[in-house]
Image: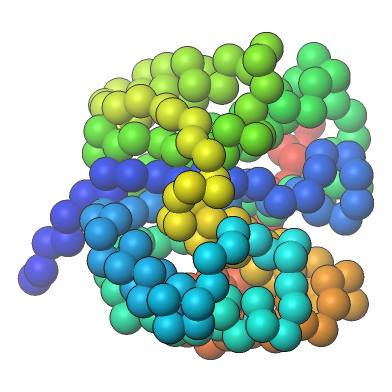
Amino acid sequence: MVTLPPFRFVYQDESGDIKIGRNFVVGLLRVRNREPILEAIRQVREHEKFTNELHFEKVSPFRERVYCEIFKSVAQVHSEFVFCAIVVRNDLLISLAPFAGQRHFGYNFFTKLLLMNRHVGIENAIIYTDEKSRIKEDNFFEYLQTEVNLRRGRNVVKKVESLNSKQDDIMQLTDLFVGCANNIAGGSRFCGERKTRIRNVAEKLRLVTRYDLWIWRPKKK
């Protein structure tokens, strides 16, 4: 039996807004080795002469082709990463009161919840989050590291860092996967034909599937 290396890096991203729209989604891309993934993306960028940011919200015929080619390329090194996401239906999230009325506390909570339930294989990892998603008053870094390590009784999280997604292709890949997850959860009638075709490619390659999504339900009192 082959023992795979642990996940040493975890990329976190979000799609949708709490209490706005149908769903919001928090996704985690758990990564063993970054270099094969970066090389797979680099090859497509070079071939397509695409230098812009990969972003699921930005689509065009050219971008659709690039995104699908990137999916095909990273699928060749799929053993280096695993994606998962938690989908929260806004109609089931009655109030922001448990998060002191602050949306960013809600994102923090669901990120922690997902990481605690998908922690297997993650060891002493660096968690990366998009700096655009964090605000000055946010205690996300300390909260996530302390809560997960204490509750799991081991060093799941080494540290949490923010980075500029425009300068990191794996964070941009995470954005594409999270967008696909939200598309799956919302259905094509909410997302547009082009985005749905992009998501279909991700599903066909088993990069993002319905089995990777945790559809959250509030606990019954």
Residue 104 is left or right of residue 109, and the answer is: right
Q: Is residue 109 above or below residue 69?
A: above
Which residue lies at the image location 75% right of the left edge and 62% below the top edge?
57
Residue 33 is left or right of residue 116, and the answer is: left
Q: How is the model colour-coded?
A: rainbow
Could you say which is closer to the camera, residue 85 or residue 66? 66
Q: Position of residue 171 (x, y in %)?
A: 49, 51
Could you say which is closer to the camera, residue 49 or residue 165? 49
Whether residue 202 is visible, yes or no, is no
Which residue lies at the image location 83% right of the left edge and 71% below the top edge?
191
Q: Position of residue 116 (x, y in %)?
A: 46, 37
Examine the image and state in which quarter residue 53 appears: bottom right
Whether residue 53 is visible, yes or no, is yes
Q: Is residue 38 above or below residue 60?
A: above
Q: Position of residue 10 (x, y in %)?
A: 40, 45
Examine the image and state in which quarter residue 215 appears: bottom right
Could you say which is closer to the camera, residue 207 or residue 69? 69
Q: Quadrant of the N terminus?
A: bottom left
Which residue lies at the image location 66% right of the left edge and 34% below the top edge?
133
Q: Quadrant of the C terminus?
A: top right
